Structures are given as structure tokens and as C-alpha cells.
Amino acid sequence: MNQHLQTIVDFIQRDGNLTEDEKNKISQLLKGVDKELTITAFKLDRTEKVKRTTAILLEETIEELEQKRKAIEETNSALTISLEELKAAQAKLVQSEKMASLGELTAGIAHEIQNPLNFVNNFSEVSKELLDEMKTELDNGNTEDAKSIAADVIQNLEKILYHGKRADGIVKGMLQHSRTSNGQKEPTDINALADEYLRLAYHGLRAKEKSFNATLKTNYDETIEQINIIPQDIGRVLLNLINNAFYTVDEKRKQHNSGYEPAVWVTTKKLTGKIELSVKDNGNGIPPKVLHKIFQPFFTTKPTGQGMGLGLSLAYDIVKAHGGELTVESDEGQGTTFVIKIPDTSAQ
Ligand SMILES: Nc1ncnc2c1ncn2[C@@H]1O[C@H](COP(=O)(O)OP(=O)(O)OP(=O)(O)O)[C@@H](O)[C@H]1O
Ligand SMILES: [Mg+2]
């Protein structure tokens, strides 16, 4: 029994004023109190143990959390490194895609340069002959004839200059295409740009694949004024869309023996506050179940080596960066239309 209680019991036992019965009752009560005290002490002890166990567990949990935090930190820095690497790889890929599309253009460019070059060569030859004639006329004292020959030569030289400049422009355009875009917008004739890329893509493909053929149908809205765009970027968008169109009509042509006429339409239209550019084909179309995937990077249905699946995702980003939108409508088996809408900056 609790020592203090025992003292009280002893004290009561010795008390002469209490009857035996009363002493027993009080002793009984005090025994009850003692029991309760024991139980409370036991409970206290248990609570203490639980407290200690909890403290230990808490310490362990804190340690575990600390370890996890460290692990997360490490994963984070690993992720940051991977992200950096990924960004670098993506930049390389974009550059290589640019070079690949430049490769696609080379044949077209060669074809385009050949034309002015032929002019330059022919006119130079003719002018040389004319100058020989002029010398003879001068020797003979025929100044009037010599003068008229000189006028012809001047005219020819003007033509040489004109075609030389044309070739120059084509080469400059090619360099611009391969150059990393400096992000500078400049006033651009969108009709001329669309037409240039259409012809380059067409002749490029024709040079690579002799059997390729398609009717080109263009409809340019002549009321469109110059708009502010990054020409080499929008050029790449057009090139991707046109090449995709050529690819599908050529696939369809190979599947059909006759009765199919591959055609690609390039149209520009001035809308209110916007310029619309569309590239339409009568190729195989895009199955509805993959239509939502075509703008994803690396989605391609082309055989390895023929497509990286980057064209449309790049196109999408470029059009977005111009504050515009790129949409698609496709009818499986019938054809596809891609529509670019960009702000008409000439209207502001
Ligand atoms: N005009 C189209 N007609 C039918 N399918 C198309 C057309 N344009 C795109 N697609 C589909 O969308 C896919 C993705 O096109 P995207 O231009 O992004 O990549 P790609 O042409 O396959 O490869 P890359 O452009 O990198 O050479 C194509 O593989 C094709 O399945
Ligand atoms: Mg493509």
C-alpha cells in the first residue's frame, strides 16, 4: 500500500474515539483509494512509455524524411541536367531539320537558278557578238549603226543585270532559310513567299523523283499588303505543309493505277484583321483516330528515313509565335486542308 495511506490507516487503528466497525470501513475505503492510485500510476507509466516510443518513431520519421528530401533534391538536379541536355538535343534536332529541309530545297534552288543563269549566258554571248559587229561598223565609219548596236547591248546588259539579281535573290533566300532565325519580323509579301516555296518544293521533289507529278493550283489574294512576319520561319511552315501534301498525293498516285490526278492548292485570302493561307491536297487524308496526334513532335506515319514527325509540331510553334493559329481538316481518302491564320499587321 501507498506509504502515506498506510500511515493514515495506522493512525486510524490507534484512534480510541472510533469504533472497530468505523475503523474497518475507513480502512476499506483507503484500500480502494490505494487501488485506484496503483492503477493511475500504472497508466502514467504506460503513457510515459508510449511517449518515449512516439519520440523515437518521430525521430526515425524525421530522419527518413530528411533522406527522402535529399533523394528528391538529387533527382531534381538530375532532372535539371536532363532537361538541359534535352533542350540542347532539341536545338540540334531543329537545326538538323532545317538543314534537311534545305537539302530538300537544293534541287529546287538549282532548277530556279538555272533559268536566270541561262539568260545571263545567252545575253552575254549575244552582246559579245554585237560588240564585235559594233567594232566593224565603227571601223567603217558607220556611227549611226554603231549607236543602234550600242543601244541593243545596253538593253541586253540590263537583262543580264535583272537575271543576275534574280539568281542573287534565290541564293540569298536559301541562305536565309538555313540561317538560325534571328527572330526579326520584317515586312513580307506573303503571296511571293508562298509561291517561291511552292515552286522550290515542287522542282526539288521532281528532281529527286522523276515520276512525281502534281497539278499546282494557286489562288493569291492580290489585295494583301506586306505583313510583318519572320519570312524564313513562315517559309518553313509552308514548306512542311507543301511537302506533306506532295507526299500524300504521290502515295495515292502510286496506289491508283489511273484515273487519279494529284493536285495541291495553295491559297491566300485577306480576312478582317487576319491573313489566311491554306494548303490543300486531294491525297489520302488523315484517319480520325490519329488526327489529334499529328501536331505532336515525332508523330509520323512515314517510313524511317522519310520523316521525323517534326514538321507539323514546328509549324504549330512557329504559327503560335506569330500570334496565329494552324488548323486542319481532313476527309479520309479524299484529302486534307491545313489553314494558317496570322494577324494582318498591315491593317494596324
Ligand atoms: N497532307 C497530309 N495528308 C495526310 N497525312 C498528313 C498530311 N500532313 C501530315 N500528315 C500526317 O501527319 C504526320 C505528321 O506530319 P509531320 O509533318 O509533323 O511529320 P512528317 O511529315 O511525318 O515528318 P517530317 O515533317 O519531320 O519530315 C505525317 O506522318 C502524316 O501521317
Ligand atoms: Mg512533314
Image (cartoon, grey):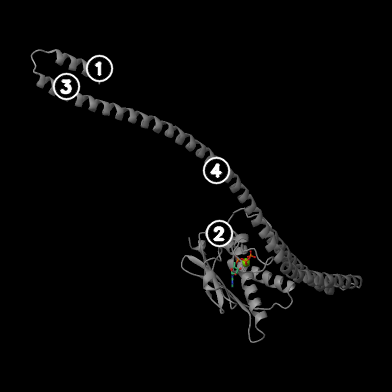
Would residue 90 be visible to someone looking at this image? yes
Q: Which badge, 1 or 4, comes first in the chain's sequence?
A: 1
Q: Circle 2: is it few (<14), some (14-19), or many (20+) Cα within 10 Å?
A: some
Q: Position of residue 236 (x, y in %)?
A: 62, 63
**Which residue is disc 4 drawn over?**
76
Q: Which badge, 2 or 3, comes first in the chain's sequence?
A: 3
Residue plotted at (58% across, 56% down): 185
Q: Label 2, label 3: how many angstroms apart (C-alpha)?
A: 94 Å
Is 80 drawn above or below residue 275 in the view shown?
above
In depth, the one of 91 and 70 nearer the eye is 70
**Which residue is disc 3 drawn over?**
27
What is the count of numbered marks? 4
Amino acid type assigned to the residue bearing label 3 in the image: Ser
The part of the image, by quadrant, that contains residue 171 is: bottom right
Q: Position of residue 136 (x, y in %)?
A: 90, 72
Q: Label 4, label 3: how many angstroms apart (C-alpha)?
A: 72 Å
**Which residue is disc 1 drawn over?**
3
Furthest residue to the bottom? 259
**Which residue is disc 2 drawn over?**
317
Would residue 223 be visible to someone looking at this image? no
Residue plotted at (62% across, 70% down): 244
